[in-house]
Image (cartoon, rainbow, N blue to C red):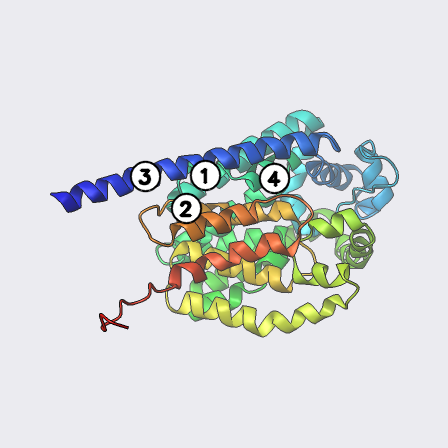
Amino acid sequence: MVDSAATASRLRLGQLTLGLVLAVFVLMSLAFVREVLSVQPAGIDFAPLWAGGRAALHAPGRLYDFAYVSGLQGWPLGHDHPRPFVYPPSALIVFAPFAIIPYWPSYALWLVLTGAAFLVSGLKAGAPWWFVLLPWVTFCALCGQVSFLLGALILSGLRLTQARPILAGLLFGAAAAIKPQFLLLLPFALLAEARWRSLAATAASGLLLCGASAALWGPAPWREWIAALPRFQAVVFANPALLRNAVTPYAALVQHGLPGAWAFSLAPAAALWVWLAFRRGAEIAERLIALVGGALLISPYAMNYDMALFAPATGIYLARTSERRWPFYAAAAYAQSRGFGIGLLTLAPALALPAIRRLRRPRPSSNPNP
């Protein structure tokens, strides 16, 4: 009776503490909104997607002309801040329909559709609804980034690999057609689980979307996209403010005057991490962190808004208030939500969550008089 009362008391205390932590996150989200809107308009990262879709519809030959695409957006930050379209042509299958309607209705529709998909995919994966209160989710929505759509596709694919492997592969292929760098380690994951049908479906759907884009806009945009990537990277790495908000080891090295390519030496460790996580059938939160986090360890470019991809997994860990490790989960969640300008220090706490869960409690000593 006493044990049950103590357990109930601990559960109530855990829920109360969780509520306080979530209140802190809401306040941080509001601070994000105030800080972001003081320096840039809402939807500023959706603007290049919309403008890229508009260029594809009306001037596909200028799709990767940075000045032209920035001009379609009205230069929201001025001529010193280009806003190019740098997604692969296959992503236009998704973006072009949104460019048919004016910008603000398109931005609102984008948020509703991709945000709903992200929420539903998170709930079906076991995340609590309040994962959308985490600050990077708010930031991603305010920017109008593609992370919600990408997260919904990847998370749904991870959830369906066993029950519906072909559908899972189709979702992975769609995600890779939008941001291929986030699926760099997916082959290791699917091979580790022997998901041959998912692997085949991923390749087939990716090739289908690439072929569809070539059929609609010709092969030239693909050559232009490859040529645009180093130009875009030069723009990012020449901007100290952008570089501070990048979350990859590559960007951290460049920021400190070191060769970014050194980050590629992490590739074997990242691939091994993904292989082991999927080989042992880790829970979906750990698999999401391994797959996306491993890719970010070896990608040259990813920004702080991409941290929204980890929100469902972070929510799953934070919901475990009965575990003794919970304070460490909360500390890691707070650290990854801390704010702007800390780059790689934002990513590291997210990647640490599975390791925290695997920490074993110290065993009591058998010697009563140590």
What amino acid is at disc 4? Cys
* Label 1 vs 4, first from the N-terminus: 1
Q: Which residue is mark 4?
A: 140
Q: Residue at x 49, y 41 (%)?
A: 118
Does 222 sit above or below residue 131? below
Ranked by sequence position, the earlier of labels 2 and 4 is 4
Checking the image for residue 21, the label placed there is: 1
Three-letter amino acid code at disc 3? Answer: Leu
| Position of residue 274 in the picture relative to residue 344 (left or right) | left
Residue 42 in view in this figure: no
Q: What kind of element bears circle 1?
A: helix
Q: Residues within 10 Å of mark 3 (few under 14, many from 20)?
A: some
User: Do the CB atoms of the residues marked 2 and 4 lie less than 8 Å apart?
Assistant: no
Going 48% across and 55% down the picture, which residue do you hit? 288
Q: In the displayed structure, would residue 325 be above or below residue 4?
A: below
Residue 104, compared with residue 252, is above or below; it is above
Under tag 4, what secondary structure?
helix
Residue in the image at 66% along x and 62% along y = 249
- Decide which of tag 1 and tag 3 comes sooner along the chain: 3
Packing grade of label 4 (10 A; few <14, some 14-19, many >=20) is many
Mark 2 touching mark 1, by CB under 8 A?
A: yes
Report helix, strand or loop for mark 2.
Answer: helix
Which residue has dot 2 on it? 318
- Residue nearer the viewer, 101 or 8: 8
